Amino acid sequence: MSKGILMVVSGPSGAGKSTVVQELVAQTEGTYLSISVTTRSPRPFEKQGEHYYFVSESEFRSMIEGGELLEYAEYAGNFYGTPAVEVDKMLSEGKDVILEIDIQGGLQVKERRPDVVLAFLIPPTVEELESRLRLRGSESEMTIRKRLEIAEREYKNVSQYDYVVVNDNVEDAAARLQAILVAERCSAKRVNPKDIKKC
Amino acid sequence: MSKGILMVVSGPSGAGKSTVVQELVAQTEGTYLSISVTTRSPRPFEKQGEHYYFVSESEFRSMIEGGELLEYAEYAGNFYGTPAVEVDKMLSEGKDVILEIDIQGGLQVKERRPDVVLAFLIPPTVEELESRLRLRGSESEMTIRKRLEIAEREYKNVSQYDYVVVNDNVEDAAARLQAILVAERCSAKRVNPKDIKKC
């Protein structure tokens, strides 16, 4: 059986990553959404091993030292990371594994797993991004400005990514990510000419 | 409007290229199958400008000299080639253009249009290829042996191609080529970060 595809989906806040990735996984047999490990406290509705693996900071640090994480980062005093063991198990079972992480995380994964596919999800326009952030209604003007600045900075890194996927609507964006998975399975660099069977 | 994708579909005789490409074009809006120019005589059912553009050898030679062909080759004393003008017109209208040509032709196109996508269609196994060639019933044992030898030699060139698509059945193979077109439109190398609109 051929190995699955490891795909990172990044994109600015307000691009709709979570919704599109959930649609992709729901619509595509044999895909698996990686569960991150974090040191932050669970929110009331969050379940251990479903939304996150919740661990202590010392546990997290020992995972870093043991090389058990494909990437990690600190936000607002909490650590977030992607455990390698489950990802690699799914890939070896032929499943496609999706990581919903930021660009810095994506580039960290690329160093450790060079065959990763990096996809960048964007809203149709910057204006659309701004209006989506405002629609949330939960963030201050300063936060929105800051997010837009980060988005603009991130757009400049798009060239380090493999794909740019426009999220004009959830179904089409998910279908594009699905097409990327199919195409990547047919990629000549993943096919050993000696055992051409099925791409 | 963004430019269309130029895709070459090659593969050994018996891989089912024509059937799959016709299915692809029939199922995919905005795709166009390039019509070759040839010096061979039309067969009774063949129409000028539909199956081929039939031209004289001197007309063909002047197309070569004028740089009007994306690729050309000689088989059994006849010339076959791909006229650039129509391909480029379709691409500039945003249509995806499919060329059904051999590996040598594909690599010639790559030199002239470096952003071409090269896809190699193969039967599930070499045994399957052999049995398909025999099923045709129209070719001698020697011809079949020769085709299998050529196929084996071509398999070694797969690494120069971008994609390897298995033709286990026509619908699935056409769907894979369709997915490749979608993915290539999202390819970061085709997207100008300054005018990210739609991939």
Image (cartoon, coloured by chain):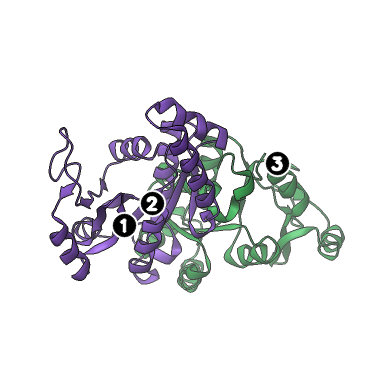
Chain colours: A green, B purple
Residue under numbered circle 2: B102
Q: Residue at x 14, y 61 (%)?
A: B58
Q: Residue at x 19, y 59 (%)?
A: B89
Question: Could you tell me if residue A94 is visible in this image?
Answer: yes
**Are the residues at dot 1 and dot 2 in contact (C-beta closer than 8 Å)?**
yes
Viewer-side label of 1, 2: 1
Please state which of residues A160 and B120 is positioned toward the viewer in this rendering: B120
The spot of residue B49 in percent (x, y) is 14, 46
Q: Residues within 10 Å of mark 3 (few under 14, many from 20)?
A: few
The spot of residue A33 in percent (x, y) is 63, 45
Residue under numbered circle 1: B73
Do the residues at discs 1 and 2 belong to one chain?
Answer: yes
User: Could you tell me which quadrant the C terminus of chain A lies in?
Assistant: top right
SS for dot 1 = strand
Q: Residue A50 carries which label?
A: 3
SS for dot 2 = loop
The spot of residue A166 in percent (x, y) is 40, 55
Q: Residues within 10 Å of mark 1 (few under 14, many from 20)?
A: some
**Are the residues at dot 1 and dot 3 in contact (C-beta closer than 8 Å)?**
no
Amino acid type, label 2: Asp
Please state which of residues A125 and A181 is positioned toward the viewer in this rendering: A181
Amino acid type, label 3: Glu
Q: Distance between the residues labelled 1 and 3?
A: 59 Å
The spot of residue A127 in percent (x, y) is 35, 63
Q: Which residue is drawn at 45% across and 34% down?
A: B172
**Are the residues at dot 3 and dot 2 in contact (C-beta closer than 8 Å)?**
no
Chain name for mark 1: B
Please state which of residues A56 and A2 is positioned toward the viewer in this rendering: A2
